[in-house]
Structures are given as structure tokens and as C-alpha cells.
Amino acid sequence: MRVITDVLSLDISKRGGDLERADLLKYAQVKNHPELPVRLFSPQDPRYVAQSGLRAADKRPEPNHLALYRADADEYRLKPGESKLVVPLTWSEDGITVTKTYTFYPGTCAVKQKTTTFPVVSTDQNGTGGYKVLKPAEYYQGVTASLQSAGFCAETDSVSVSVRNGIDFSEDYDILLGTGHVRRGQGSYRQTCTPPSFPLDASQVISYIRVAFYSIRCPEGVEVPRNAEDKLPVGCTGFVTATPKTKDNLDVKQGLIGTQIDWTFEQEGEHVRLNEFGDDVPFNKVLTAVNLGHWTLCATVKAFRGCQFGEVTPGAQ
């Protein structure tokens, strides 16, 4: 299957979940030929791939580099403004489910890979004969983390799990029996809360709004500044995104904040030209530097305001 970010193009094989091909989109093999990117991994000679897997000590079926994984899609793309792209692959056999998750981030070639193992039983196998959880706290945290990696907002108090995928309601689940065995199927559902039981207000989650470049493109011969510098050389185009952040500097889930955002833009004279990124991407803007000077671009989300204080610097000399 194919994975594409702003800096990488990759092929991940469902056979073993191996990373078979990796092209560096920002680096060409030959100058002025971006259609020929540097290839880091390749299944062809000379073969160089990234493999990982697990072994079973008792000769049971194992999710090694030959196991066949499943995926929900054949192509994954990191969209502008997204803080990460999560690509999960799943293998299940003989009562064990293994999820191999690749996580990609904008502006970097770094790739995070995590393998999670869960025992599985049929949905009617509760209590005696089912699986007993020996570490309930870790189990609740693991289930919550899996839901979050799938794009849900999820919380646990180590007694139940609360889940939401929007801003209208949440659902509570009791996933353990009093005996410590896994509770499965419809019996795990407890209630629907309207309004959601967590959080009640965005102010409980949002700490600040980060307004910054996530990508800058410049003509040949112009040095591209770092995104965090908030500088844009004349002739360059900068792509800005507004990101609500928690106190722990994590991105707030899109389902919580909705799509409403208010932008304000100030400059004395014309130093940059401000353009919309697109009607379906309200949290992004596009800036093109034309003259030396400064600008201020601010975004307000749920009464929280953040600004970019930018400077246009000299371009090609």
C-alpha cells in the first residue's frame, strides 16, 4: 500500500508490514529533476527494506516478516494542516491480534513504528473461559490509547471507558467484569451522555493556539528558513496552520473543536499576500512574500487566540 506525506513517498507491504520503498521527495537524484527523488529503501537490487516482527515461543502462528496483515485502505495521505498520519496494519490468528502502527509527521522523514498485542476471544466468551486481565489499570490505558490512535476522543477512570467522535454526545463502556475477565459485545455498553460527559467545554482542553508555518517553498537559490523562525524571504511562499494545543503541547482532537475559526491579518503596506488554502481547510492560510517588512496573522478558536508575528527577509541576492 502507498503512503504519501509532504516529504516522503513510501510503499508498505501487507506481507509482514515491511517498509519496502521510501523516496525522499525533497531530494532529487539529479538536479532540476524532482521526478527522480532519492530512494532510501528499495525491494529491488540492491535490496534494502525495514522489517520487524514477533516470534512465538511455543511454535504457534506468529506475526513475523512473512505474516499477512490487513489494512483499511490501499493509500494514506498526510493532508495539509494535519499534525500526523497514523497507518495501522492488523494481524489476527489463533486468539491473538497484533497491530503494527506506523506514524508519520509533516516536515520530517522520521517514522515511528509501534507493535501492540492483544488476546482476542469471541464476543460471547465472557467470564470463566474468557481472558482474565491481570493488570486492569494497564488494560484500561491500553484500550484508551488504541481508541485515540484510531481518531476517537477517549478517556478512562480505570472503572469505565468514555468515547466520543464529535461534539454532540459521548458513550460509556464497562469493559471488565467483577471477576476481572474481559467484558465483550453489547453487554459492555452502559450509557449515552448528551452533552458529552467529557470534556464539557473546550476551555478544559485548549491551552493555546499555535499559528506557524508547516512548510515553506522558495525559488532555486533562496535558502529556506526553518518553519519556527516565522521568516519568509521575498519570492517564497509559506503555508500556515492554526493548531489548538493542550497544556502538554499536544494537538486538540478535531472532533472537539469543530471547524469554526476566525482569522485577522495586519501589515503596514504590502509585505505579504494572504490567500485561502481552500474552502475545506479553514485552519490553513497561504502567504507569499513580496516586500521587506512585518506582518501579524492571528487565529481565534473557541475564544482562544494565537498569532504569528512574521518578517519578510531578503530573497535571492
Image: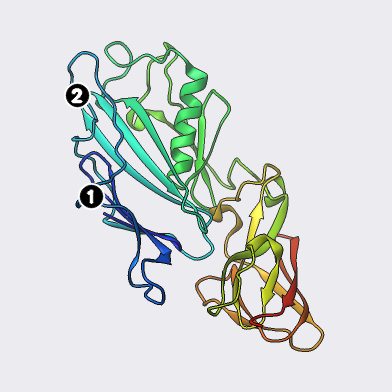
Q: Residues within 10 Å of mark 2 (few under 14, many from 20)?
A: few
Q: Provide residue 96's location: percent of width, then percent of height.
A: 26, 25
Give the residue number, with chain letter if any, for mark 1.
46
Indicate the quadrant containing the C terminus: top left, top right, bottom left or bottom right. bottom right
Q: Provide residue 270's location: percent of width, then percent of height.
A: 74, 88
Q: Is residue 167 visible?
A: no
Circle 2: residue type: Asp
Give the residue number, with chain letter if any, for mark 2.
94
Circle 1: residue type: Pro
Q: Provide residue 212's location: percent of width, then percent of height.
A: 66, 64
User: In terms of depth relative to the viewer, which is nearer, 63 or 98?
Assistant: 63
User: In terms of depth relative to the viewer, which is nearer, 51 or 305?
Assistant: 51
Residue for point 37% across, 23% down: 183
Element marked by disc 2: loop
Q: Up-down: is 153 above or below 132?
A: below
Q: Provide residue 79's location: percent of width, then percent of height.
A: 46, 63
Element marked by disc 1: loop
Residue for point 42% across, 45% down: 150
In this rendering, position of residue 163 left or right of residue 286: left
User: In terms of depth relative to the viewer, which is nearer, 137 or 232?
Assistant: 232
Which-is-in-front pick, marks 1 and 2?
1
Q: Quadrant of residue 132?
A: top left
